[in-house]
Amino acid sequence: MGGFMMSNTDLRAPNVSFISTQRLKRTVRDFGNLVPNLVVEIKSKTDRVSKLEDQLKLFLELGAKVAILINSDELTVNLYHPDGKITLLTEDDQLTLAELFPGWEIAISELSPPVFE
């Protein structure tokens, strides 16, 4: 799927998204007219955190269950929840998304870019 058509007719394409098979029975080749269960943005050097947060919050307002911002510069992950709660995870933490992927987890340290010597 190329991205998502939002209810305000904006087109959005997060870095990573997930839609459960209960909600999407068939692959869409272009932009979908639904909100994903999960959206992930990965901050690049040129991205402004505030702009990424605004996009993630819009997805949550429209029905996403979880939004994630990965900041590899700071080795942190912010989890945004529909109730407005933000959970900060650092490289010593584990990311779990039990509401979407029961039993799955990954160490935040594994999300950082590799260091080459």
Image: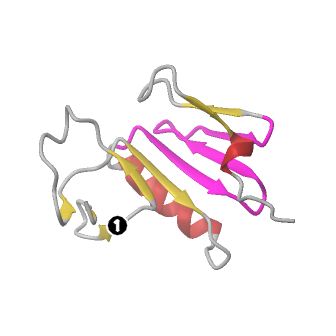
Q: Position of residue 51 (x, y in %)?
A: 55, 69
Secondary structure under tag 1 reads: strand
Q: Which residue, as the protein is rendered here, is positioned at the far right? A: 117
Residue 35 relative to residue 88: left or right: left
Q: Position of residue 105 (x, y in %)?
A: 58, 29
Q: Tell me where residue 86 sits by quadrant.
A: top right
Q: Which residue, as the protein is rendered here, is positioned at the far top? A: 103
Q: Is residue 65 magenta?
A: yes
Q: Position of residue 40 (x, y in %)?
A: 49, 53
Q: Position of residue 4 (x, y in %)?
A: 27, 61
Nearer-the-camera pick, 113 or 74: 113
Which residue sits at x=52%, y=59%? 41
Residue 82 relative to residue 69: left or right: left
Which residue sits at x=36%, y=65%? 13
Q: Is the C terminus in the top left, top right, bottom left or bottom right quadrant?
A: bottom right
Magenta-drawn segment: 64-92
Which residue sits at x=49%, y=24%? 98
Judge whether 104 appears above or below 43 on screen. Answer: above
Q: Which residue, as the protein is rendered here, is positioned at the far left? A: 26
Residue 71 relative to residue 24: left or right: right
Circle 1 Cα neighbour tier, 10 Å, few/some/many (<14 / 14–19 / ≥20): some
Which residue sits at x=63%, y=66%? 49
* Amino acid marked by disc 1: Arg
Q: Is residue 69 magenta?
A: yes
Q: Which residue is mark 1?
A: 12
Which colour scheme appears in the figure?
Answer: secondary structure
